[in-house]
Image (cartoon, grey):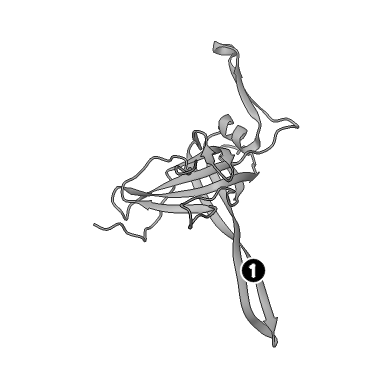
Amino acid sequence: MALKTVTKLFGVDDAKLFPIIEDSETKFTCAGGIDLPGVRQISLTYEIEEKSLTGDEKVLEISNKIKSVTFNIEYAKLSLEVLAQLTGGTFAKTGQDENEECTFTFGGGDLPNYFQLKAQILDTSNDGGDVHFCVYKAKATAIPLNGVQDDFATLTFDGRGVFTEHEFGIEGSKQTKLIDIEIHSKAKDLTATVDESAA
């Protein structure tokens, strides 16, 4: 059966951050994925800049351009590794046995890091398939931490995705990347999308 290009989306099954190692003219590479534990929700919004040409007391033409994407993610469990990637802070384990502790630290010289965001939704329209969302190059823009009385706390962060510096593709049809949405006939694990053809 041919792969369907229209599908319903239900829930979100996995999401990972892939720290960007290099985004240059010659290379786009990422480190291993950091799991968002218990991902609950993801929303993406295209940010469109619009200009209107007016005359004769009406709008004559509209010019618009997608400049970036914004997103919001909710996940269920605190991860110091995720916090370190989002903020540029660090985490470390010290002590042993009952004296062991893990500490996240953010200091004055720390800056948020770029990462690639990947999310997976299992696809019930294409039996056994899935849908992947990839924001190629993103940074967090807000990271609230909340506790809730008599209930589980969930964590969220907002971010913005921008175009890569690196151009993907083959000579004659290269372009920078902002976002991909892929439908697969068979579900695939989330892995970083890099340019395998780059020198």
Examine the image and state in which quarter residue 103 appears.
Answer: top right
Examine the image and state in which quarter residue 90 appears.
Answer: top right
- Identity of the residue drawn at 61% across and 68% down: 64
User: Is 35 left or right of 114, judged from the image as shown?
Assistant: left
Q: Is residue 41 above or below residue 93?
A: below
Q: Is residue 14 above or below residue 70?
A: above
User: Looking at the image, can residue 61 be seen?
Assistant: yes
Q: Is residue 57 above or below residue 186?
A: below
Q: 97 or 62: which is nearer to us?
A: 62
User: How far across and how far down the image is residue 180, in percent?
Assistant: 47, 53
User: Is 81 left or right of 183, judged from the image as shown?
Assistant: right
Q: Residues within 10 Å of mark 1 (few under 14, many from 20)?
A: few
- Identity of the residue drawn at 66% across and 75% down: 52
User: Is 145 left or right of 193, judged from the image as shown?
Assistant: right
Q: Residue furthest left?
A: 1
Where is mark 1, residue-wise?
Answer: 50
Q: Amino acid at mark 1?
A: Glu
Q: Residue furthest right?
A: 108
User: Looking at the image, can residue 153 be seen?
Assistant: no
User: How far across and how far down the image is residue 157, in percent?
Assistant: 60, 44
Name the quadrant of the N terminus.
bottom left
Q: 58 or 20: which is nearer to us?
A: 20
Number of numbered markers: 1
The secondary structure type at the circle numbered 1 is strand
- Identity of the residue drawn at 32% across and 59% down: 4
